[in-house]
Image: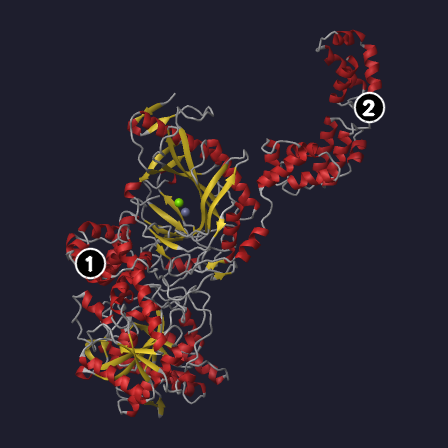
Amino acid sequence: MSETASERISTEAVIKAARLSRLDLTPAEVARMTSQLAGMLEHFADIDALDLSAVEPMTRPYPLSNVFREDVVVQGLDRDEVLANAPAAEEGRFRVPPIVGLDG
Amino acid sequence: MFHQSLDWTVEMTTIPSTAAAIADAVRSGVLKATDVLEAHLARIAEREGEIHAFNLVTTDEARAAAARIDADVAAGRDPGVLAGVPIAIKDNMCTRGIATTCSSKILEGWRPPYDATVVQRLAAAGAVTIGKTNLDEFAMGSSTENSAFGVTYNPRDITRVSGGSSGGSAAAVAAGFSPISIGSDTGGSIRQPAALCGVVGVKPTYGTVSRYGLVAFASSLDQVGPFSTDVRDSALVLEAISGHDPMDSTSIPQGPLSLQGVLSQGVEGLRVGRITDMPGGADPDVTERLEAAFDALQAAGAIMVDVQMPSMKYGLTAYYLIAPAEASSNLARYDGVRYGMRVNAPDTNAMYSATRSAGFGDEVKRRIMLGTYALSAGYYDAYYGKALKVRRLISEDFDRAYTKADVLLTPTSPIVAFPVGAKSDDPLAMYLCDVYTIPTNLAGHPAMSVPFGTGAFGLPVGVQIMAPTLGEQTMFRVAASLERSMIASGGGR
Amino acid sequence: MTQFDMSKNEIKVAPNDGSYLLDGYELVCGLEVHVELATATKLFSASANRFGDEPNTHIDPVTLGLPGALPVLNRQAVELAMRIGLALNCTVQSSTFHRKNYFYPDMPKAYQISQYDQPINVNGWLELPSGKSIGIERAHLEEDTGKSTHVGGAGGRIHGSAHSLIDFNRAGVPLVEIVGRPDIATPDEARQYVTELRQILVAIGASDAKMEEGSMRCDANVSVRKPGAPLGIRCEIKNVNSVRSLGRAIEYEARRQIVLLEAGEKIRQETRHWDETDGRTHTLRSKEDADDYRYFLEPDLVPLDPDAAWIEAVRAALPMLPRERRNRLAQATGVASDAESIMVIVERGQDDYVLAVGLAGGDVGRALVHVKEAFAEQGSNPAVPAGDLAGMIILETGGKLTSTQAKTVLGELVAHGGGDATAIAAAKGFEALDNSALEAIVDQVIAAQSESWAKYCGGEEKAMGALVGAIMKASQGKADGKAVTALLQAKRS
Ligand SMILES: [Mg+2]
Ligand SMILES: [Zn+2]
């Protein structure tokens, strides 16, 4: 391939992926991640040589369709047991820090 | 067997080494489940310190369960086909009220409020869960070195890895901690550690064993399956855990597999395929054992055929784009809101990042990043979209191959167990361990690894038997035949 | 008519004078309506779909996005979605589910399962009472989020809150998102569209569609342009909680955009929030920093492919829709199909009742008027038997009851859940006053008040008042005012 590894993924793309993934990466981690991902993508460039224009994507291994459950209520989980497993809870609900920096 | 006999004696009673024999003895009242359990707990006390197969040994719960089995037998109730058999469960399967960590700090201390379907079915069959086994964090790895709770060492050589990601489950069986165990296999995570530890490991057809309660890594690839010391035990466990589960939409609507009955059928006339354009890279000691396996099957009456799998070499790429993409989404739920760890921060968004950055290890972060990138706007078509098409090509290769062959044989792993730390700094080198196991996950087919002698340093080598969708019976016939030839050649019992 | 303060990015607008074009611009508006389906359970799990209960009492592994949980599709939700599609003249097609990945604390898995490029319903339309058609692009299935409560901030706002509390009862409730085409040209059409849609949803039993409870939620995409010009940049308005607010919000937003354009500014594509208290829209987020949702096919679900027989069975079971019912009632009564009385009766679901009164011999037009006025508190099944109301109407139209008396009798019927109108009239002393009796009284009064009669005959209309008053008095209130007037006019000519 003519592209070099570093062209396969930019620092900006790594930073964006980290933001989308909610991972804090230090500048050193960004640099390391960029080079590791670039190395992998370089390796994965083997499929670029394939002509895939007529190939249907395959998303699942076994062909099933129309799998349903009936609309019948089943007793769910105990709230106290679930909230006991939560990092923070209050008034029967899960507590989180103020929701800023998020949409909505 | 390649390791020393695991039969041992408790108060004048011999504890058999296989699940089938233990269950027979417990059901008929010859052995007590509690005695079986204590013998295995003693084994764990002896060697777990140097192997670290378990994240948690559930001694109390196991003693209570074994006592119930004994009470059932005493009362004339049949506890089931796995009566009193100790079983180790990979720590990415939900066990009600018992910590389930996926070997990740992010889930440390979490106690699921429900049991995985597999766990339910095993308990219903009378099996006694003895503990939760170590794995590469969220099943991402091929050596069980990527665990937040430490490495699982190979019982055959404790300077070496046990393979992964189900290294703990493989090691537990290889060390005699339990005759059988359960793992999950997304790209080889049952078969490769089985090969490296010298035990049998099976990945059934996608949809055969319920994924409900298996903590997802890559949903379209994950399958649950057994480890055992011999082929029959794996057949026994699969019969107990397979069959339709309405809680899993991808579960195939059919009854449990029926396997034990076919084990004695032999392989006469079966067509065993050799992939002539298989990706290279296997060590000579490994390929030598593969050749020996072909010879053994031919001697048993099977017919050798050549097949081509021109797209097989692209499997690694397809897999390492598809699996991380699905994983990036599956692992987004670990956000510090509802369960698991939280690192406090002034606002929710900062809390997410702080929690996830502290809670996930390097390999998990790498795959989340890779998967996020492969799915993100502008890159989807070039990476994820293309990988799905390659997945189709590989599946079609298999379809063609299976018109000529009933099963295909490959090495399970290109190499024997490697020293701890040997590949830790090179993610790609680690990924190459899965080159022979990945294609069946992409196609959704069954495959299993059977121990077939030893290679370099006297370490076990596994041979992989692959079969088409729902071809488990044929696959198990071949596995049983290979096992018989090993015993006949003096390589096993 | 408009002041604009650029610094605050807000405008005050004069009230709607009902005329569109707005300042020479035309409005282009499309609505996205989310409706919660009236199922017993959630879209992908068996917890109850119920509004208003104690927080986190309808939760299960799927709802909470617990590790290992898997979604299984609710058949009834699919059926209700199909009903919606068919009622909106859509094509029902085979469909798939995708994951829409984004982090928010009320989104348990950090992805929403939603239909993306293959929705279940496409290409329909909704006809407004006026006869205008609004296109429906798609109506797809997806899951609802949980609910966040912001604690410590002023007025429960996000900004300034100390923390937020999350209730997952609503998480996973089935939604259908109905995406309308931008065919709406006035705020009033938007109101009509939502009102009509709501009636359809209630009529087919798909949703209770209560905007105030959030079971029906409406987002408006608003842009403006000069007639013939290409489409303008649109803004999406969220948080509109009533039909009335919808009109106001669209009105405000259109004018805001016009003011900007007139000032030579560009419209920024963004999501804006309707604030009920100040009657304005505010920037929520701009599209530039919109999330990259990384949609991909949900691997835990399988395609949804309803066969023709199922679709036809759902279609056949659809009740008559509001539009058809209005036409039917209009035809029976001779009133225009978009007349207020017709709209109201069909909205209350009392049209069958009105027609039943007609079948029982009562005049349908009178029935329409009486039911509209007196049955507002009754549901679609009024307590008064249709025959009883018909009996009263027969007396009224036969001149046996004055309109005042008719109202009194109707009041008795409503108060007692029915009764014999003739008996009630008799008990009230409303004895029959037939036409000959009335004429006799009229002649009597004309003779007694010859002066007034002469004036009236001379064209002095005011003189009629005195005559009518005298006639009413002479008849002890039993004469019908209209009949008296008609008689006087007839005698004059
Ligand atoms: Mg939308
Ligand atoms: Zn939506």
State the image coordinates of residue C279 (x, y, percent, origin top left).
Answer: 41, 31
**On the image, which quarter does residue B125 sit in?**
bottom left
Please tell me how many numbered marks the rendered image carries: 2
**On the image, which quarter does residue B234 sit in?**
bottom left
Give the quadrant of the C terminus of chain B: bottom left
**On the image, which quarter does residue B205 sit in?**
bottom left
Image: A67 above or below C285: below
Mark drawn on residue A37:
1
Image: C117 above or below B480: above
Cβ of mark 2 under 8 Å from ligand 2: the answer is no
| Label pair 2/1, CB-CB below 8 angstroms | no
Tag 1: residue type? Leu
The chain under label 1 reads A
State the image coordinates of residue B468 (x, y, percent, origin top left).
Answer: 37, 74
The front one of B345 and C196 is C196
Tag 2: residue type? Asn
State the image coordinates of residue B239 (x, y, percent, origin top left).
Answer: 42, 78
State the image coordinates of residue B484 (x, y, percent, origin top left).
Answer: 32, 89
Mark drawn on residue B117:
none
The front one of B286 and B268 is B268
Q: Which residue is mark 2?
A: C435
The chain under label 2 reads C
Mark 1 element type: helix
Q: Residue B288, can we see it?
A: yes
Label 2, label 1: how far apart the Cα atoms are? 99 Å
